[in-house]
Image (cartoon, helix red, strand yellow):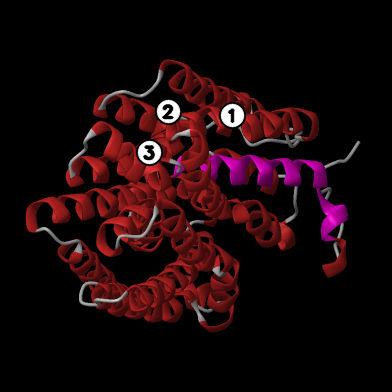
Amino acid sequence: MATAWNGAKDTPDSFWNSGHTPTLIAAFLYFDFAFMVWVLLGPLAPEIATTLGLTPAQKGLMVAVPTLAGALLRVVNGLLVDRIGPKRSGAISQIIVIAGLATAWMLGVTSFAGTLALGVVLGFAGASFAIALPLASRWYPPEHQGKAMGLAGMGNSGTVLAALFAPGLAKLFGWNAVLGLACIPLSLVFVAYMAMAKDPPNAPAPKRLGEYLSPLKQGDAWWLMGFYAVTFGGFVGLAASLPIYFTDRFGLSTIHAGYATAACVFAGSLVRPMGGALADKVGGVKTLMAVFVVAAVALAGVASVTTMPAALALFVIAMLALGVGNGSVFQLVPQRFAAEIGVMTGLVGMAGGVGGFYLASSLGLAKQWTGSFAPGFLVFAALALVALAGLVVVKAGWRARWGTAQGVRI
């Protein structure tokens, strides 16, 4: 039986022997397929909207609700992990999602209210972030934490699976059947998870609720949450909304819109670990400053383009920037809040989900009120510039107070 790190010095090549590889694999699979169903309503949205006669605002809210529910449930899952352990917390969450999807498939989703209720259930999948990462990372020593969290965190690539396969399956079997079909891989992953995952020994003592909220008394926590609301919020908001945008704006079929969305999402997922590495090398603040500039320019550009190739190119650029930003924020978080890293992971992750809810819902409202998605993209581009201004305000203080003191690049 594998044991957690015991304090012995590890070499760079000893990562796979320093923790518990089956648990790491189980955490990745859980996270990957949970993220797949978290954004499932996005690729299905054009078909659902046609069947139920939804307005643009309703479409935007439908794909945004899972993001908001996932954001709020991340805090709940953080509390649950501390009290009953990550393995059991993950098992409960997976059962809720599988049962919810199976019920929706059997009974059918026949109203806008039904899509919102399903969105809340899918929020449990989005909240897997707060379970999968501690499940994997607590098995590994400090020098391997980045690798462990990076490998488990690559599960956000599951959003690509939804964009690639959900539209085609909906065309073959109907969109409601896709809800039932999704239960098949989720059930297989659940079996593998229960067989492979093990709770790490020497788990930290459960925290009181007040301890979870204590970082919110510090301004730095709010700044980091705000920055992640833009980077991850932009990433997941676009992942959920682009199928609607591509079908409405350029008349793409749902299948081709899914392929275009998958290309954008894959770009953002791929560079997240690279963002952390770049931030380690040149500093998280410098990296984020470039991220906000590039994202703002790309999203503002999307508002004015008239061709599909130009829009796709700008979305890929925006997603690359936002993916780098996601890694950069989490390079900064442990440097400022090393003692509260678990709590801050949940709070920052929640803020990212709230940002995604805002972007997805605002695009729907913009389309309904103005007949164009452009105002929604322009407002979010402006928020990226606001984040840039905030970063300029705090960077000198951060470098003086905790960057120089720790001898690290920020």
Give the residue at the far front of this rendering. Answer: 172
Mark 2 lies on residue: 121
Q: Position of residue 95 (x, y in %)?
A: 58, 22
Task: Please tell me how crowded label 2 is: few (under 14), some (14-19), or many (20+) other residues with Cα within 10 Å.
Answer: many
Quadrant where the N terminus sits is top right
Task: Please name the predominant secondary structure of the magenta segment in the image.
Answer: helix
Q: Nearer the viewer, residue 280 or 273?
A: 273
Label 3, secondary structure: give it.
helix
Mark 3 lies on residue: 66
Q: Position of residue 312 (x, y in %)?
A: 39, 72
Q: Position of residue 206 (x, y in %)?
A: 56, 30
Q: Which residues are magenta?
A: 15-39
Question: Label 3 amino acid?
Answer: Pro
Which label belongs to residue 183? 1
Location of residue 136 with respect to 385 vertically, above or below: above
Q: Residue at x 39, y 81 (%)?
A: 290
Left or right: 318 in relation to 20:
left
Query: In front: mark 2 or mark 1?
Result: 1
Label 1, secondary structure: give it.
helix
Q: Position of residue 310 (x, y in %)?
A: 34, 79
User: Mark 2 and 3 residues: CB-CB less than 8 Å, in contact?
Assistant: no
Question: Label 2 amino acid?
Answer: Val
